[in-house]
Image (cartoon, rainbow, N blue to C red):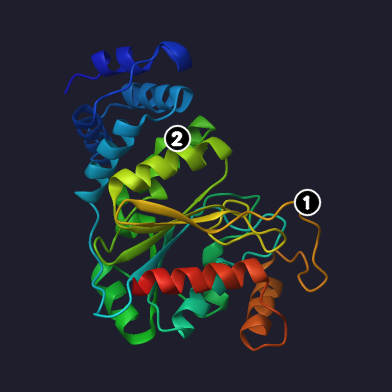
């Protein structure tokens, strides 16, 4: 493939760029995932997409390329598997993503966690998961066995999708995130048997992801994440939308007002304190914040739908 014509289309800035159609987007992202794009052209494509943002057809094309390369994890009959991406880690607040996973597993819902961590200023979610005895497995087959045995499995992205992992690693060289970070939220290792949890940071992405999830189909929850992670802000409930085969509805409206600290929820982003807090909530010694409890209940119901 020659990349100059593509860069010419998408590289004209936020106002002058023209989006790719779905077929062209699928082809170029496939080459990006397969490591076929030379470094110079790859950097140009990454920055052009970042500046102009991804159009709806581009996202669908990128997703098709991603689906074609995503190993599938076996899910037993029964509830769908909730898929929790983790790509940020704790910064100031305790990371309650593992709490969501453990509460769902307690309800009999399988949970697959996938992610990558390369932020020196944040606490690694994989260190937190390890403190709770949740460890990454070697491949998709092992993940299926873990789901069958204990209802929770964890895969690092370099194991699940090495091509996407390489694209995410470009942030360390280029200084900014790119389209690959958006697509990492949409990885579906259990197609047809999943409930994806899609957490976004910027408000404009809520609308973009809404349209994408309606077009892409399947089951999903969309919410504004907490410090980039896939759990509802315990201090103020975000709007939580659920998607079932292209139909969207608001499961929980956003709470109004600010997000003051909670007396029962200390800021403890460190691994030991964060893990101890999650254990206390699981054992009933500390209350589970209402937004997290509502998120878990909604996901459990969606997994049964």
- According to the picture, the residue beneath numbered tag 1 turns out to be 258
**80 sits to left or right of 71:** right
- According to the picture, the residue beneath numbered tag 2 turns out to be 178
State the count of labels: 2
Q: Is residue 76 visible?
A: yes
Going 83% across and 70% down the picture, which residue do you hit?
A: 263
Which quadrant: the C terminus? bottom left
**7 sits to left or right of 198:** left
Query: Is 141 drawn above or below residue 249 in the view shown?
Result: below
Q: Dots 1 and 2: beta carbons under 8 Å?
A: no
Q: Secondary structure at mark 2?
A: loop
Q: Quadrant of residue 29?
A: top left
Q: Position of residue 195 (x, y in %)?
A: 37, 63
Residue positioned most to the left: 1
Which badge, 1 or 2, is on the more N-terminal residue? Answer: 2
The residue closer to the viewer here, 269 or 182, is 182
Query: Is 252 drawn above or below residue 177 in the view shown?
Result: below
């Amino acid at each position: 493939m020659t990349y100059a014509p593509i860069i010419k289309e998408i590289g004209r800035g936020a106002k002058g760029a023209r989006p790719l159609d779905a077929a062209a987007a699928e082809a170029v992202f496939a080459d990006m995932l397969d490591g076929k794009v030379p470094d110079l052209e790859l950097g140009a494509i990454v920055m052009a997409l970042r500046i102009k943002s991804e159009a709806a057809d581009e996202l669908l094309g990128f997703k098709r390329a991603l689906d074609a390369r995503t190993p599938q994890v076996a899910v037993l009959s029964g509830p769908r598997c909730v898929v929790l991406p983790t790509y940020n880690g704790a910064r100031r607040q305790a990371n309650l993503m593992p709490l969501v996973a453990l509460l769902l597993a307690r309800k009999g819902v399988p949970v697959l966690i996938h992610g990558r961590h390369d932020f020196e200023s944040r606490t690694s979610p994989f260190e937190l998961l390890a403190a709770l005895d949740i460890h990454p497995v070697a491949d998709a087959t092992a993940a299926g066995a873990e789901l069958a045995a204990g209802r929770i499995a964890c895969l690092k992205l370099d194991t699940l999708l090495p091509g996407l992992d390489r694209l995410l690693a470009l942030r360390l060289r280029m200084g900014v995130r790119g389209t690959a970070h958006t697509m990492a939220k949409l990885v579906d290792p259990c197609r047809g048997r999943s409930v994806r949890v899609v957490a976004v940071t910027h408000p404009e992405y809520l609308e973009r992801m809404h349209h994408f999830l309606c077009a892409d189909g399947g089951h999903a929850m969309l919410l504004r994440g907490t410090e980039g992670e896939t759990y509802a802000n315990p201090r103020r409930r975000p709007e939580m939308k659920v998607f079932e085969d292209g139909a969207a509805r608001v499961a929980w409206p956003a709470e109004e007002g600010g997000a003051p600290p909670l007396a029962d929820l200390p800021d403890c982003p460190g691994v030991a304190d964060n893990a101890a807090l999650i254990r206390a909530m699981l054992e009933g010694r500390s209350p589970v914040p209402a937004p997290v409890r509502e998120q878990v209940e909604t996901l459990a119901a969606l997994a049964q739908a």
